[in-house]
């Protein structure tokens, strides 16, 4: 742990203002709360929103896991994990089940989250209606009136163009039957994991200066139509390493001839499955 | 504005531990979480309530304090948090209520606006314990199905609460604070009053 910085890097005044926003976010699930986002020692787009939320929440007894696209060993995940080791001296882990606090970019772990765990999402664009309506004044009004018809029109246009809803990630959801929310760029595959999750889900968008939350056991419904019900992606393949048939798979090009293989995106899940079958894992 | 009483012995970590209990309490309405830092609270204030004040309040917050408290509390609050004291409940970010049996009408506080429902008052209400009150069943976000609670709150309070919750997302959020424990009541919690507890006065 390095000296000269406050525990978890942020000053206490900043933590208090973020904490007040977090409490309101939990009280109004899915509603975006403005917060005074600080400059962090990494660029916007590298998870500064998630880092600030984690910094406001983390304590000495927490065990932190950080994932990027499901992996514990990619640049973003490694950097953020090291950052919190430096400024908090907390224990870290790669095991989903051992973590009390999980910061994530673009995935929800395959291993179901437990009551008492907190997952913090890094969010690039928090406003689900932003690509439909560019004005913040207007989108705020649309949320106030629960005027979400335009999003259904967008999804319907997908169906008329492609025959199905083509939105593959950041698939819009309704939270607690009231607010439309962007789940951050997780694959559509992960959306059902948010519904009635026993874990507390917190979202931080640093550049856009917004915080929102989904409390445990809260309804999170992916938008759909009666005749085009919501469905998740499916693969004809299995994971090359652990043989999983039900996890989210990454397609990896492995030769100049265009050979490819499919592997679990969640490295911990794949690792645990490989170990339990005495197979050699994809990472260790 | 002088006080003889110290604040948190370990300001950074005591505030963090207190905040986590407050966060957990609001995320799991009706469940009790511990707040027990080594803190001597000002007269008339519980340890949990004093810790919540030190954790949440600063110069950016307006605090309304119910009359009937000790003057020393205001000095303690101003000295340790730098908060501003207001006499207008409509302008309050936080409201301090001394007794769960005497919570003012919730409609008197700030409920936020349609566009900014978060600009609403958070009530810190002191209670004597977790039973002996009207038995109430909660449903809503953070509760798997339903949860029965009976904190010592007046049936008047629950009447006001039931008038408020249909106005969601507008409304106030409440922390109930006993000596060293906290329970959260976010505006999403819909309450059904089951029956009067024995000996509870209205």
Image: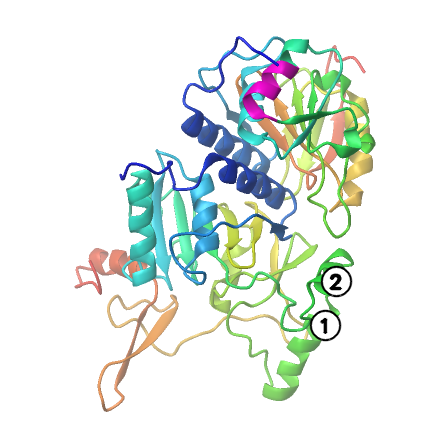
How many residues crowd around disc 1 within 10 Å: few (fewer than 14), some, or many (20 or more)? few
Q: Nearer the viewer, residue B59 or A135?
A: B59
Q: Which residues are magenta?
A: B74-82
Residue bearing the label numbered 2: A142
On residue A150, the disc is 1
N-terminal-most mark, 2 or 1: 2
Q: Position of residue A61 (x, y in %)?
A: 35, 34
* Element type at mark 2: helix
A238 magenta-colored: no
Residue ID at (66%, 77%): A154
Residue A118 seen by the camera: no
Label 1: element kind: helix
Based on the displayed image, in which of its 4 quarters is residue B53 positioned?
A: top right
How crowded pointer 2 is (Cα within 10 Å; few <14, some 14-19, many 20+) is rated as some
Residue at left offset 80%, top offset 44%: B167
Query: With B82 as the anchor, is A259 left or right in this view?
Result: left
How are the colours assigned in the image? rainbow
Q: Quadrant of the N terminus of chain B?
A: top right
Magenta part mainly helix, strand or loop? Answer: helix
Residue A216 locus on image (x, y percent): 54, 45
Tell me if label 2 and label 1 are in contact, CB under 8 Å.
yes
Q: Is residue A99 above or below residue A226?
A: above
- Percent position of residue B125, x then y: 67, 22
Dot label at residue A29:
none
Chain under callout 2? A
The chain letter under disc 1 is A
The answer to whether residue A150 is left or right of residue A191 is: right
Asked if A163 appears above or below A197 in the picture, the reply is below
Image point (36%, 57%), residue name: A67
The answer to whether residue B61 is visible is yes
The answer to whether residue B77 is magenta is yes
């Amino acid at each position: 742990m390095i000296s000269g910085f406050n525990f978890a890097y942020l000053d206490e005044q900043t933590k208090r203002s973020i904490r007040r926003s977090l409490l309101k976010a939990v009280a109004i699930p899915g509603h975006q709360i403005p917060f005074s986002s600080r400059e962090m020692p990494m660029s916007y787009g590298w998870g500064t929103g998630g880092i600030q939320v984690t910094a406001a929440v983390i304590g000495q007894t927490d065990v932190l896991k950080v994932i990027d696209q499901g992996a514990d060993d990619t640049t973003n995940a490694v950097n953020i994990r090291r950052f919190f080791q430096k400024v908090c001296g907390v224990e870290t882990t790669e095991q989903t089940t051992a973590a009390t606090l999980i910061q994530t970019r673009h995935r929800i772990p395959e291993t179901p989250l437990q009551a008492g765990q907190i997952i913090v999402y890094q969010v690039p664009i928090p406003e689900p209606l932003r690509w439909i309506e560019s004005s913040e004044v207007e989108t705020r009004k649309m949320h106030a009136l629960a005027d979400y018809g335009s999003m259904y029109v967008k999804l319907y246009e997908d169906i008329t163009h492609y025959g199905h809803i083509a939105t593959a990630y950041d698939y819009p959801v309704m939270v607690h039957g009231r607010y439309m929310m962007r789940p951050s760029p997780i694959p559509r595959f992960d959306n059902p994991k948010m519904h009635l999750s026993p874990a507390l889900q917190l979202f931080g968008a640093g550049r856009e200066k917004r915080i929102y939350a989904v409390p445990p056991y809260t309804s999170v419904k992916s938008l759909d139509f009666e005749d085009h019900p919501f469905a998740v992606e499916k693969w004809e393949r299995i994971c090359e390493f652990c043989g999983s048939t039900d996890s989210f798979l990454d397609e990896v090009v492995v030769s100049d001839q265009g050979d490819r293989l499919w592997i679990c995106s969640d490295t911990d899940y794949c690792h645990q499955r490989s170990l339990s079958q005495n197979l050699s894992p994809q990472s260790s | 504005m002088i006080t003889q009483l110290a604040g948190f012995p370990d300001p950074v970590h005591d505030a963090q531990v207190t905040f986590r209990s407050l966060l957990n309490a609001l995320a799991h309405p009706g469940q009790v979480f511990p707040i027990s830092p080594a803190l001597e609270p000002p007269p008339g204030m519980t340890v949990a309530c004093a810790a919540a004040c030190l954790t949440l309040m600063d110069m950016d917050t307006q605090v309304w304090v119910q009359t009937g408290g000790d003057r020393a509390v205001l000095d303690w609050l101003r000295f340790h948090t730098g908060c501003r004291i207001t006499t207008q409940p409509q302008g309050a970010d936080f409201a301090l209520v001394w007794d769960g049996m005497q919570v003012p009408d919730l409609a008197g506080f700030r409920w936020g606006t349609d566009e900014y429902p978060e600009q609403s008052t958070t009530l810190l209400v002191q209670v004597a314990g977790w039973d002996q009150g009207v038995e109430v069943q909660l449903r809503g976000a953070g509760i798997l199905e339903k949860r029965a609670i009976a904190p010592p709150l007046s049936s008047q309070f629950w009447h006001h609460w039931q008038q408020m919750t249909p106005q969601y997302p507008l409304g106030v959020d409440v922390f109930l604070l006993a000596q060293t424990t906290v329970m959260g009541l976010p505006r999403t919690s819909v309450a059904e009053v089951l029956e009067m507890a024995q000996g509870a006065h209205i």
